[in-house]
Amino acid sequence: MTETTRPPDMEPALRTLAMPADANPNGDIFGGWVLAQMDLAGGVAAAGRAGGRTVTVAVEAMRFHAPIAVGDLVTCYARVVKSGRTSITVAIETWARRRRGPTEVRVTEGTFIYVAIDEEGRPRPLPEEAA
């Protein structure tokens, strides 16, 4: 993913507030909490492409750029970058609007892979992409 200085010009897949229960003893938000938010956001994009249920099968890449503090507004942007027969690769950027001002900073980025599944939880083919 390329280095950017402002959030992507796209609709967020998820927006939430970092709360005290999500922090470690140093006051920073746990990386696992951030990873979970990114997985939720990626799932939104993947389900949209799949036209239904998907499951996470891999986190191909994950990079932490800056910590998130309690009170930061956390926004995840997700976009489908590749589709296979059953799989969907989603690039996700997470940005934080700092509690003490209008500053927004990219805090994480990652690549997540999802698979479309049927009612029995088995992989199913993706629908044709709209033109």
Image (cartoon, rainbow, N blue to C red):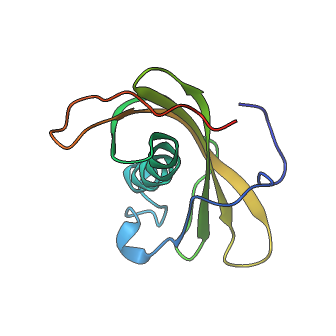
Q: Which quarter of the rendering shows the C terminus?
A: top right
Residue 10 or residue 84, whichever sits in front: 84
- Residue 38: percent from the left, percent from the top? 48, 50
* 25 is higher (above) or lower (below) than 31: below
Is 41 above or below relative to 88?
below
> Residue 46: x percent and y percent?
48, 43
How many marks on residues? 0
Instruction: Name the residue at 37% across, 64% down.
Output: 25
Left or right, 66 with respect to 49, comes to: right
Relative image position of residue 87 (x, y in whole percent): 43, 26
Q: Does residue 50 appear in this view?
A: yes
Q: Is residue 38 left or right of residue 15?
A: left
Which residue is the extreme one toward the top?
85
Left or right for 131, reference 112? right
Q: Residue furthest right?
A: 5
Q: Residue at x 45, y 40 (%)?
A: 50
Quadrant location, the N terminus:
top right
Q: Residue 72 is drawn in which quadrant?
A: bottom right
Res 79 quadrant in image: top right
Q: Is residue 62 visible?
A: no
Residue at 59% across, 34% down:
129
Give the residue drawn at x 59%, y 65%. 74
Q: Is residue 83 above or below residue 27?
A: above
Q: Is residue 55 left or right of residue 27?
A: left
